[in-house]
Image: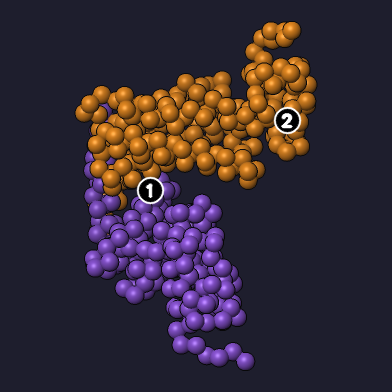
Chain colours: A orange, B purple
Amino acid sequence: MARWEPNAQERLVRAALDLFVERGYDATTVAEIADRAGLTKSTFFRHFADKREVLFRGQGDMAARFAEAIRGAPAGTTTVGCLAAALESVADTFTEERRALARQRRAVIEAHSELKERELLKMARVRAAVAEALRDRGVDDSTVLLATELGLLALAASYVRWTEAPDGPSYTEIAHATLGDLQERAAELGAEGVR
Amino acid sequence: MARWEPNAQERLVRAALDLFVERGYDATTVAEIADRAGLTKSTFFRHFADKREVLFRGQGDMAARFAEAIRGAPAGTTTVGCLAAALESVADTFTEERRALARQRRAVIEAHSELKERELLKMARVRAAVAEALRDRGVDDSTVLLATELGLLALAASYVRWTEAPDGPSYTEIAHATLGDLQERAAELGAEGVR
């Protein structure tokens, strides 16, 4: 019978990320992760299907949460307001305890082309979900295209800024500032002459 | 010795696209393309390395041309002006004679996941080239991110609109209108409140 292990999942994530950074993702085995966490391989497999899932689990629903936040925004919410709601909807994933882990995660993914592709695919799903949710609110096609990119840029930049500043502002604060910054650039580009 | 064949390359492109649409890309052989064009296989291989090159040849330098146009824009040109110059720089590829062929090309690529990936890769190269060229002009990071997406959205939408309207305005006219349209949306998004 499986013994209940306190914080097993969190311990496994920490052990895995430490090993991925130390030895590289490919060179790390599930046995080593379990061992470093002081747990058994079978405990690992009760929490994760494989070592890749340590990096991507719980993030698979990001597209769904973004879409839900946009669909659930009160009638009359601006398009940018919908994007802000979408960015806020994942704040409980980007908590203070996870900031250092997220930074390690980013480094591991950046160093590995297959993991980078997986991350790009995740972002493509978020992009499609945002576009569809905005379209469903009656936003016109051109605005959907541009607003979706604005939202995706804000998400990517916020995530990087959040992981890079261990004692900096919270993810939510960063996301709002980043979205506001991009909005300003949009206004500037919108006002420019073509020559 | 190879015989000189008038318009061999164009005849091969037409034959290939017709066959790709009729039979599917995978089911079409180089021998069939040459045969349909009234030419030999060795003539085909003097013009193209393989059948995929029929779809992507001459387009490989799009990233370079975009970058060159942005770098070559006079000092003081606005960021949007640089994007307009980039879009204009490929107008000699999107000529009237090629509009119907480009429409066939799009249909073939859309129906084939590997070709779609190849097209996405091409766009990723254009994206990277545009971002780097704008950065080299001293444009700030956030504006580079947003302006690059604006340029890429304008390119993609212009290409679709141009191929979809056989008797419509020229590519250059469409590109300017599309960029202007996206600029308006940028201004609107920039002016919105967050609630």
Residue at the extreme left of the image, as rendered? A76
- In this rendered view, identify the residue nearer to me: A27 or A173: A27
Classify the position of the C terminus of chain B by image quarter. top left
Label 1: which secondary element: helix
Q: Amino acid at mark 2?
A: Leu
Q: Is residue A79 left or right of residue A29?
A: left
Residue at horizontal 69%, vertical 21%? A45
Q: CA distance from mark 1 to mark 2?
A: 36 Å
Task: Estimate the x, y position of residue B46 in percent, counting from the top left.
Answer: 58, 80
Q: Residues within 10 Å of mark 2 (few under 14, many from 20)?
A: some
Quarter of image, res B77: bottom left
Q: Is residue A184 visible?
A: no
Residue at horizontal 52%, vertical 41%? A121
Q: Is residue B159 above or below residue A178?
A: below
Q: Is residue B186 above or below residue A3?
A: below
The residue carrying mark 1 is B146
User: Which chain is disc 1 placed on?
Assistant: B
Q: Is residue A134 visible?
A: yes
Task: Estimate the x, y position of residue B107 in percent, counting from the top left.
Answer: 41, 58
Classify the position of the N terminus of chain B by image quarter. bottom right
Quarter of image, res A139: top left
- On whether disc 1 and disc 2 are found on a single subunit, the reply is no
Total labels drawn: 2
Q: Which mark is residue A19?
A: 2
Residue at horizontal 50%, vertical 88%? B5
- In this rendered view, identify the residue nearer to me: A51 or A93: A51
Label 2: which secondary element: helix
- In this rendered view, identify the residue nearer to me: B159 or B69: B159
Q: Amino acid at mark 1?
A: Leu
